[in-house]
């Protein structure tokens, strides 16, 4: 193929095209306020402005008709009643809430959004909202010299996306995953801007192929889509955390996951027989290496038919699931959307007879080739189909399976476009439209169908869902892994900003394939990656067929012992991690965070790609290169204690830290606390002893956090069966005072008290717990 050679950059390949001609929305002709929505009629189109809260503004432009304000697949919030003040002048209109001010210039129509202190959030200059005759819509926004951009869902490259341009089009990308790889599996058309220590967010709710361009101009950025409305939300912030709370207020937050799903997952494409799976589980048990989940890839199925088991490879799946569950291990099978075209296959028969599959407008079923061969695809845009597909998961739940892995749901098809024909007509819950418009939400809606179906069939137990494809709001149903990465150090490096930007995009439960999926991993890479994986929200080791097996024991005892240590650490840190997942379910905040989220005033954190935080007080600085045992670590404001050595480091400085292969540099901020549990065994993973490690400060530090626990498996917490302790730690030269300021919930854990361990206590300092000199918090 010439395209695979330097011919791809032959000068003769350049295509001459005229300048992009956009039609501006033009002059404001009239406006009116109807039911808390401003509707503007302009020369070349119509604009609507809604306030969802005092701090969240929705702007919609439709060039042909009145803006449509319903039908979003991402938004779950309704506009609240907001107090509005309006000031009309000759050339401008000012609309204000308690937190934002909208300045609208009438000729031409231009919108500037300010906060209540007059700080510019987003603004339009010479160009504003516009469109092209081919249906493309675009928004031009002023870009400031100090603007830094984050989020955009699942994108390769560095943390700060300034100077980049991205496309949103869910794509199956086996190779390559490079910083220049543009469209990946997830499309989340949302970003956060950090400017001079203050943050705001923009969510462009358009499901067509869309583009974000922070590259083509130094003073302007754009977001555009091939069709549909220009429909975007501005979140005023002003802190990064507040932006995330605002964004997840409108798109939803993660449900509290089952505790077992936060443990260690082992996967391969594929463990091909029941005996191989049993031997795998047995080895984990014998070696006392923690394991919560074994994933079954496509080889478990009969000819890759979903909702089947190959009875030769897996003769008794019900007993396999039960036996593994008895060992403390769950089974999570893969389920793809492609249904094999086979007239003797009941799922295909039902799909055809009950009209469940995607069709062309003329009525013909769309067929594409995937793993089973020629296949039909459920039309998840239709509620009837979502319910049908969800109910089919009884096949799995009847076996005791509590988690599902959705793959190939971009949807991926083995053809030149890599996906479904864009002229396929989806039913879209009574508003038919093309796959060109709904491609990016196919995976999201499959996730909704799967999660809701599993939830109903599990009768009170929490389901776990892992998905490859999704759209904004995917966090409501699924955790996300970053797809088919490779066993390269560069991919380990790239995984950190990828996971952090997914977290900044509302997806708190995410992680890469540890060790790399394709290519042969090696002992050092797998060891270093396992250290990182122990602290990414989703922790799965996964490898591809034809490449080296990469279970923790594959590289000898030395490396096995180190990996075992860090997998066990995952469980020792489970009380801390589970509390952070609770916070994510309540506020939408990520578990794994870039330092800029906690230190937005510190410019040194703005593009810090090789460090991350868990929660608000622990910094991780992993080794991400081969043969390296020393690295520079930047610690932000505060005084920091190295977790493994107790060495104290000053903040707002860069330190050279030594870390042999068995060490992951971890730093805890003085004056704060972390919750720790214990590793018992695979059969009994509950912490029967919980310790609060308090790192003593001396400078009047005040730290407040919530420790959370429940049964980890059911929805009983919704009825008060949980434990939530709001704890305040105050450090002075005289005392370290730990106080439970609020105690909520009726859940009684296996432990009756929390041990308090104060680290770095200074001479003469007393420890006071709830007003008394004691060593535990009674529950």
Image (tube, rainbow, N blue to C red):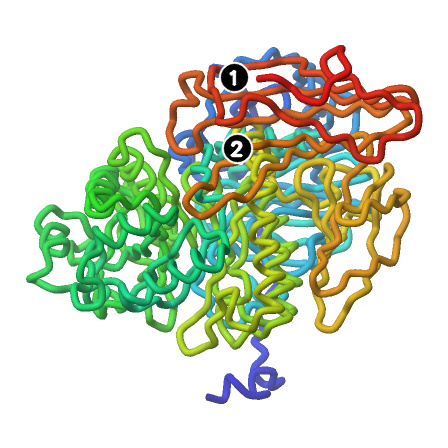
Q: Nearer the viewer, residue 4 or 142?
A: 4
Q: Position of residue 168 (x, y in %)?
A: 51, 54
Residue, x 69% and y 34% (percent of image)?
674
Residue, x 60% and y 62% (percent of image)?
561
> For the residue labelled by badge 2, is the local secondary structure a helix, a strand or a loop?
loop
Disc marking residue 731? none
- Position of the C terminus, as image quadrant, is top right
Q: Is residue 741 left or right of residue 47?
A: right
Q: Is residue 388 above or below residue 708?
A: below
Residue on which disc 2 sits: 688
Can I make out residue 143 in this image?
no
Q: Is residue 657 above or below residue 62?
A: below
Residue, x 77% and y 48% (percent of image)?
606
Residue on which disc 1 sits: 80
Looking at the rendering, which quadrant does residue 277 occupy? bottom left
Can I make out residue 99 in this image?
yes
């Amino acid at each position: 193929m010439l395209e695979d050679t330097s011919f791809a950059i032959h000068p003769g390949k350049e295509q001459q095209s005229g300048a992009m001609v956009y039609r501006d929305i033009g002059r404001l002709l009239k406006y009116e306020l109807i039911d808390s929505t401003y509707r503007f009629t302009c020369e070349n189109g119509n604009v609507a402005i809604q306030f969802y809260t005092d701090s969240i503004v929705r702007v919609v432009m439709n060039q042909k008709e009145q803006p449509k304000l319903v039908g979003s697949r991402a938004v779950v919030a309704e506009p609240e009643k907001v107090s509005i003040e309006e000031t009309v002048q000759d050339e401008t209109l000012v609309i204000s809430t308690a937190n934002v001010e909208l300045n609208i210039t009438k000729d031409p129509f231009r919108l500037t959004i300010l906060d209540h202190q007059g700080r510019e959030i987003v603004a339009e200059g010479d160009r504003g909202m516009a469109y092209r005759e081919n249906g493309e819509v675009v928004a031009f926004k002023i870009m400031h010299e100090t603007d830094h951009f984050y989020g955009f869902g699942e994108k390769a490259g560095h943390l700060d996306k300034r100077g980049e341009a991205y496309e949103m089009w869910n794509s199956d990308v086996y190779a390559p995953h490079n910083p220049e790889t543009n469209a990946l599996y997830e499309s989340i058309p949302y970003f956060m801007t950090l400017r001079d220590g203050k943050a705001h967010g923009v969510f462009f709710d358009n499901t067509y192929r869309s583009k974000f361009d922070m590259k083509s101009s130094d003073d302007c950025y754009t977001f555009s889509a091939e069709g549909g409305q220009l429909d975007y939300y501005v979140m005023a912030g002003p802190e990064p955390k507040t932006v995330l709370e605002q964004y997840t207020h409108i798109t939803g937050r993660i449900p509290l996951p089952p505790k077992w799903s936060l443990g260690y997952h082992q996967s391969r494409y594929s463990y091909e027989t029941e005996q191989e799976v049993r031997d795998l589980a047995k080895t984990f048990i014998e070696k006392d290496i923690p394991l919560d989940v074994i994933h079954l890839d496509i080889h478990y199925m009969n000819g890759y038919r979903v909702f089947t088991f190959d009875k030769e490879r897996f003769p008794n799946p019900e007993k396999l699931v039960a036996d593994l569950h008895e060992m403390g291990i769950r089974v999570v099978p893969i389920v793809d959307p492609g249904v094999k075209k086979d007239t003797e296959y009941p799922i295909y028969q039902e799909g055809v007879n009950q009209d469940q599959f995607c069709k062309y407008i003329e009525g013909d079923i769309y067929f594409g080739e995937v793993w089973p061969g020629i296949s039909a695809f459920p039309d998840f845009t239709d509620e009837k189909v979502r319910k049908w597909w969800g109910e089919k998961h009884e096949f799995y739940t009847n076996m005791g399976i509590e988690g599902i892995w959705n793959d190939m749901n971009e949807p991926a098809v083995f053809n030149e476009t890599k996906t479904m024909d864009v002229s396929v007509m989806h039913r879209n819950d009574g508003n038919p439209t093309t796959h060109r418009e709904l491609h990016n939400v196919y995976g999201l809606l499959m996730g909704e169908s799967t999660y809701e179906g599993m939830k109903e069939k599990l009768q009170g137990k929490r389901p776990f869902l892992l998905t490859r494809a999704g759209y904004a709001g995917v966090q409501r149903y699924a955790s996300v892994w970053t797809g088919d990465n490779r066993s390269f150090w560069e991919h380990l490096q790239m995984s950190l900003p990828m996971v952090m930007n997914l977290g900044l995009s509302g997806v708190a439960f995410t992680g890469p394939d540890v060790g790399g999926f394709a290519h042969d991993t090696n002992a050092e890479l797998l060891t270093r990656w396992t250290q990182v994986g122990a602290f990414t929200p989703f922790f799965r080791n996964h490898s591809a067929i034809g490449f080296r097996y990469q279970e923790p024991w594959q590289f000898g005892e030395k490396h096995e012992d180190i990996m075992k240590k860090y997998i066990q650490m995952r469980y020792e840190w489970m009380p801390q991690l589970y509390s952070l997942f609770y916070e994510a379910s309540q506020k939408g905040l990520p578990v794994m965070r870039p330092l800029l989220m906690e230190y937005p005033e510190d410019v040194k954190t703005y593009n810090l790609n090789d460090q991350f935080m868990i929660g608000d007080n622990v910094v991780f600085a992993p080794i991400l290169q081969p043969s390296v045992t020393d690295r520079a670590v930047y610690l932000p404001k505060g005084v920091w204690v190295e977790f493994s050595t107790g060495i104290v480091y000053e903040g707002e400085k860069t330190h050279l830290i030594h870390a042999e292969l068995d060490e992951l540099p971890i730093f805890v901020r003085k004056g704060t606390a972390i919750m720790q549990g214990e590793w018992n065994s695979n059969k009994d993973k509950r912490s029967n002893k919980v310790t609060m490690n308090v790192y003593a400060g001396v400078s009047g530090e005040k730290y407040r956090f919530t420790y959370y626990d429940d049964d980890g498996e059911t929805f009983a917490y919704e009825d008060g069966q949980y434990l939530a302790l709001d704890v305040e730690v105050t450090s002075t030269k005289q005392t370290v005072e730990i106080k439970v300021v609020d105690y909520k919930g009726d859940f009684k854990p296996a432990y009756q008290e929390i041990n308090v361990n104060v680290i770095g206590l200074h001479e003469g300092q007393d420890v006071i717990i709830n007003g008394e000199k004691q060593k535990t918090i009674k529950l």
